Image: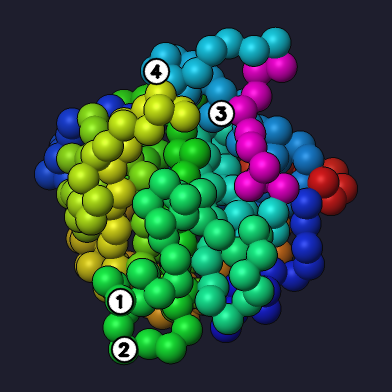
Amino acid sequence: MTWRELMPQKLNHSETNSLRNFAAPNRRVRRSLQARYACTSPIKEQAYRIRYEGYLAHGYIDANPRGILYDHFDNEYHAPSVVIYDNGKAVGTVRLCNFDSTQSTSVTDKLPSAELFELTAEKIRTRFCQNVSDVRAIEISKLAKIPECESDLGITMALFKMLKIVAIAMRTHVVFASVRVPHMSLYSRLGFRIVEEPRYFAKDNIVLGLMACQPDDFRSIQDCAERIFHGPKALGTNEIHETAATFFRGEIIDVFPHDSAENGADAERFREDQYHLEQHAA
């Protein structure tokens, strides 16, 4: 399955906790976390506002009157954003930018860090997937949470679980992230490794290092964390593909589904009452 086939149509941190902390009693409370593909203008604006609030709180950007943060990649079909909701409130977001060497070599098939770290298809193949003919990669970017949820690891894990679902469904060979130094330890615990040491980029006045992870490693570490945090059952391959297809149809995903009828009712109330966003393509 390719990225184009999965898409129904062209639609327009500093954390030091270890995974062991998920076993703490206060981390095992019932939660209602959902995810949605930012495929309409209202949901996209939610993603842009979360980014703005999160980046502004860290001092990464200056204030602007519109209170949103976006760039040209947000206009491309191959760079969908995820929005995470906690009991109906938009609290986190991440963008998943796809690279597929079987597609055209236009700007829409490039990764945000392609120019910074020279991520050409041949370089990706040589370093990460030598035995494949067609290179498929994802770069995660614009990961943010609203300031009051900055230390909430449950939301962080929800964002990375959505990455895992999309990466495995797309048969992705490697996942990239351009990471600020204070955040590298978290990415390391989630299965990423440094492949380009941090360097200063004068254009953006920022220090970034390139980290990468292959989905098999990401899957094992994520599933371990999910068992600690949410129970013994991790998603099987068929469930991952079904969940990814549901997500790209624009439907709401229960990120950490529970078996009890009470939790199912919570999710259904969210669907029916709180987020009837108009389905106008951006």
Q: Residues within 10 Å of mark 3 (few under 14, many from 20)?
A: many
Q: Over which residues does the magenta segment extend? A: 66-75
Distance CA(mark 3)–CA(mark 1): 36 Å
Distance CA(mark 2)–CA(mark 4): 41 Å
Q: Which of the two residues, 247 or 270, is positioned nearer the viewer here? A: 247
Specify whether residue 282 is in view.
yes
Badge 4 amino acid: His
Badge 2 amino acid: Asn
Residue at label 3? Answer: 50
2 or 4: mark nearer the eye: 2
Q: Which mark is residue 58?
A: 4
Distance CA(mark 1)–CA(mark 2): 9 Å
Q: Which mark is residue 126?
A: 1
Quarter of the image with the N terminus is bottom right
Q: Position of residue 231 (x, y in %)?
A: 27, 58
Which element carries disc 2, helix, strand or loop?
loop
Badge 3 amino acid: Ile
> Image height check: is 152 above or below 8?
above
Main SS, magenta region, reads loop
Question: What residue sits 63% from the left and 47% below the top?
Answer: 73
**Among the two numbered marks 3 and 1 on one chain, the one whose residue lies closer to the N terminus:** 3
Q: Which of the two residues, 265 or 154, is positioned nearer the viewer here? A: 154
**Among the two numbered marks 1 and 2 on one chain, the one whose residue lies closer to the N terminus:** 1
Distance CA(mark 4)–CA(mark 3): 12 Å
**Among the two numbered marks 3 and 2 on one chain, the one whose residue lies closer to the N terminus:** 3
3 or 2: mark nearer the eye: 2
3 or 1: mark nearer the eye: 1
Distance CA(mark 1)–CA(mark 4): 36 Å
